Every structure is written in structure tokens, then in C-alpha cells.
Amino acid sequence: CVVVLLLALRLAAQTPANIAYKCTPEEVEALGLNCSPEEPCAVFLELSSAEAAGKSLFVTGNLHTRDVTLSSILLASDDGGITWTEPATRIRNASLEQIEFLDQQTGWIGGGMIDPLTRDPFLLLTRDGGKTWRQKMILEDTTHGSIAQFHFNSLNSGELILDASQ
């Protein structure tokens, strides 16, 4: 499946950003997709959260078909939403949810794997204003659950609520 999604986050009349997604044959098989070049799968962009850090805007979410979450997505703009980049590598079968910045340099994004139940919650962390992100698993062992919400008061103090229900 080859799909181009249009991101229409606009404060003024601007050209929508193109978000490309191309399934490899391995992904089609691994994700159990019923797609072909003749009948490609529809891929949707689902946005979950938005945050500003200084002059930068960030939007989190995922790419999915009607039945399967394909990958996480993080979009960033330094020019008020005119152009967008992806500062973090997409994570297969994952979704990114809440995003929070403590200051213009330090931020967190809550995420988890979704296949089909939410499991293995993690945080993405940045200390350079969102230019780079690193993944930090919440739990050591694979377990069902998701980050319900979080808030950090400082670099060393905060709260995170983990929803372990199925």
C-alpha cells in the first residue's frame, strides 16, 4: 500500500503538508493487512495531542488502517505550521499520546504499543527542544497497560498514572 496523507493543521490559508506512508511486503504480512497494489489500504492520520515549546509546535498521534495501528508519528514545526518535519523515528504498532514540555528544551511524550491491546507503555524524552528524542520504557517486562496521564513539575519530580486494565 502506498498512501500520501495530507496534514491540514493550518492557522491561515496554507498548503497542507504531505505525510507519506509506504507499506513494504514485510509490513503487509507482519501486520496482517489485506492490501495490494491494485487495492491499497486506506491509511489514516490520527492526531492525539499538540504542544508548543518556544517557537516550536509539536503534534503526536499515529498512522492506522481501519483495523490496524501501523506506527506512531511525531510532527514538528518551527515556522508556525507552514512546514513540518518528523524529529523521531516512527515506531511500528505504536501510538503517541500526551505531550508536555517543562521548558523550551525539556519534554516528554507518552506512548505505547497497540497490537491489538495497549501494552509496553513508554515515554519519549527530549532535552534539546525536540530536535532529538529517546525512548524510555516504563516497565521492564511486557505487560498490558497504557499511560493514562502524566505531569512533571521539574526534571526530577512528577506524576504518571498507569492504566493496567484490559
Image: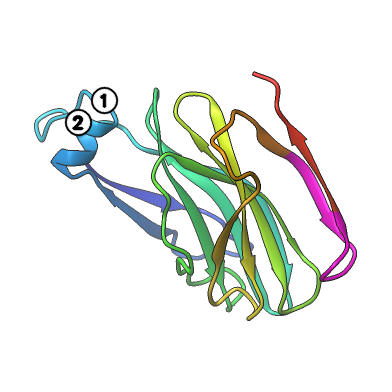
Residue 64 location (% of width, % of height): 41, 36
- Above or below, comparing residue 137 to residue 58 in the picture: above
Residue 23 location (% of width, % of height): 22, 43
- Above or below, comparing residue 73 to residue 28 in the picture: below
Q: Residue at x 65, y 56 (%)?
A: 109
Res. 32 image quadrant: top left
Q: Residue at x 55, y 77 (%)?
A: 131
Do we see residue 13 in this rendering?
no
Q: Residue at x 78, y 43 (%)?
A: 149
Question: What residue sits right under mark 2 in the picture?
Answer: 29
Q: Which mark is residue 95?
A: none
Judge left or right: residue 109 versus residue 64: right
Q: Which amino acid lies under the numbered mark 1 shown in the image of this protein?
A: Gly
Q: Residues within 10 Å of mark 2 (few under 14, many from 20)?
A: few
- Give the Cα distance between marks 2 and 1: 5 Å
Q: Which amino acid lies under the numbered mark 2 shown in the image of this protein?
A: Glu
- Above or below, comparing residue 88 to residue 3 in the picture: below
Question: What residue sits right under mark 1 in the picture?
Answer: 32
Boundaries of the magenta span: 148-158
Q: Front-most of 163 and 40?
A: 163
